[in-house]
Amino acid sequence: MRIDDSQLWSGLIGLALGAIVVWQGYEHDIGVVTEPGTGFVLFYVGWLMVVLSAVMLLVAIREGGAPIASLWEGVRWSRPMIAIGLLIAFALVFERLGFLLSTMALLIGLMRLIDPVPWLRALPIAVLAPLGSWFVIQKLLKVALPAGMLGIG
């Protein structure tokens, strides 16, 4: 019987992260169901992570599986690297260009470079989605967003 390396390591990492989340929830006052504290959700989500990670570990030990190296066979790294690059560029220009321009540029880049979408579909989505989000965040929720060069904010 061969233990599935990927599930084993995922389970162990999940257990560790779950334990950290449980601890942080406990540190931030759990409270009770009728009056939850700031750590209430963290505490119970952390326990859910611990339980699911333990199940993953048990499955890896009982059923076995493929080694972790098999997960990386045939992976094409160009798309994830393009997405990471676009997100870094977005973070760098967000304050300068503002929410609307930077988000429109990010969406066009993602839709044209990652999984090419025709321009006639990409442009309306890249314009309307940020405008809708801007309206909800800025006007309805009254949360300030960077105005950037357009001065809309």
Image (cartoon, rainbow, N blue to C red):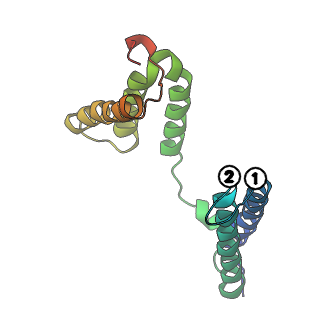
- Number of dots carrying numbers: 2
Label 1 amino acid? His
**Compared to 77, does 94 lie above or below?**
above
What's the distance in space between the residues labelled 1 and 2, CA to CA? 6 Å
Depicted 7 relative to depicted 140: above or below: below
If the image is split into quadrants, where does the C terminus sit? top left
Q: Is residue 107 visible?
A: yes
Q: Are marks 1 and 2 in contact (CB under 8 Å)?
A: yes
Q: Which residue lies under the disc numbered 1?
A: 28
Task: Describe the element under mark 1 as helix, strand or loop.
Answer: loop
Residue at (70, 82) in percent of width and height = 58
The first of marks 1 and 2 along the sequence is 1
- Three-letter code for the amino acid on which mark 2 is drawn: Thr
Q: Which mark is residue 38?
A: 2
Q: What residue is shown at x 61% (from left), y 64% (from top)? A: 34
Residue nearest the viewer, comparing 24 with 37:
37
**Position in image of residue 136 (x %, y %):** 36, 35
Of 143 and 33, which appears nearest the observer?
33
Tell me the residue at 40%/42% (across/down): 114
Residue 43, labelled with which disc?
none
Residue 131 x, y percent position in the rendering: 32, 30
Question: Compared with residue 136, is residue 8 higher up or lower down, i.e. above or below?
Answer: below
Q: Out of 66 and 54, give the one closest to the viewer.
A: 54
Q: Quadrant of the rendered structure where residue 57 is?
A: bottom right
Q: Which of the 4 image quadrants contains residue 122?
A: top left
Q: Secondary structure beneath disc 2? A: loop
